[in-house]
Image (tube, grey):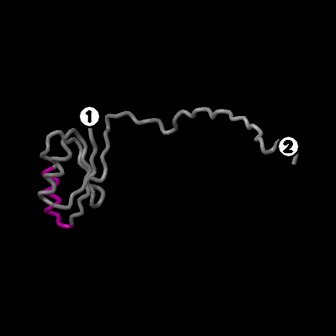
Amino acid sequence: MQDTVVFKLDVLDERIKQRAMKVVCEFPGVTLIDVKEKGKLKVSGEFDKFQMTKKLKKIYKYVDIIALQHDGEPKQNSDPVKKPEPIVKRVMSFRSWKIGFF
């Protein structure tokens, strides 16, 4: 099952970015790497995301997983089936009845 993981990697030094890319490329099962957005590293494929996080933290200690998405699972329908509401009949209360000697 393919996973897509987005890592938060706010680095200003270009050498640290290159090291992070090298670590991600060497991981077995990685199929796609995307670094178009600033401060985000998007990786897709079949790999252990926690081991990758551990390796990236050795290079730069402020690495977090922002988003995690499983590509192999079917998406659920956004509008679920609506159940009909039960019909409730109003019954007059005893207080509205004019019974009594008062």
Q: Are there few (<14), some (14-19), or many (20+) residues within 10 Å of tag 1?
A: few
Q: Nearer the viewer, residue 67 or 24?
A: 67
Can you tell which mark lies on residue 100?
2
**With respect to residue 62, does 31 lie above or below?**
above
In the drawing, does residue 90 fall left or right of residue 74? right
Q: Quadrant of the N terminus?
A: top left
Q: Report the residue that reaches farthest toward the bottom.
A: 12
Residue drawn at (68%, 33%) of the image: 87
**With respect to residue 37, does 89 lie above or below?**
above
In the drawing, does residue 70 fall left or right of residue 88? left
What residue sits right under mark 1 in the picture?
Answer: 1
Image coords of residue 2 (percent x, y) = 26, 37
Image coords of residue 59 (percent x, y) = 12, 59
Residue drawn at (13%, 62%) of the image: 15
Q: Which sits earlier in the primary sequence, circle 2 or circle 1?
A: 1
Residue drawn at (17%, 39%) of the image: 29
Label 2: state its secondary structure.
loop
Residue 60 falls within the magenta-colored stretch? no
Q: Which residues are magenta?
A: 12-23
Q: Nearer the viewer, residue 41 or 74?
A: 74
Image coords of residue 85 (percent x, y) = 63, 35
Label 1: state its secondary structure.
loop
Q: Are there few (<14), some (14-19), or many (20+) residues within 10 Å of tag 2?
A: few
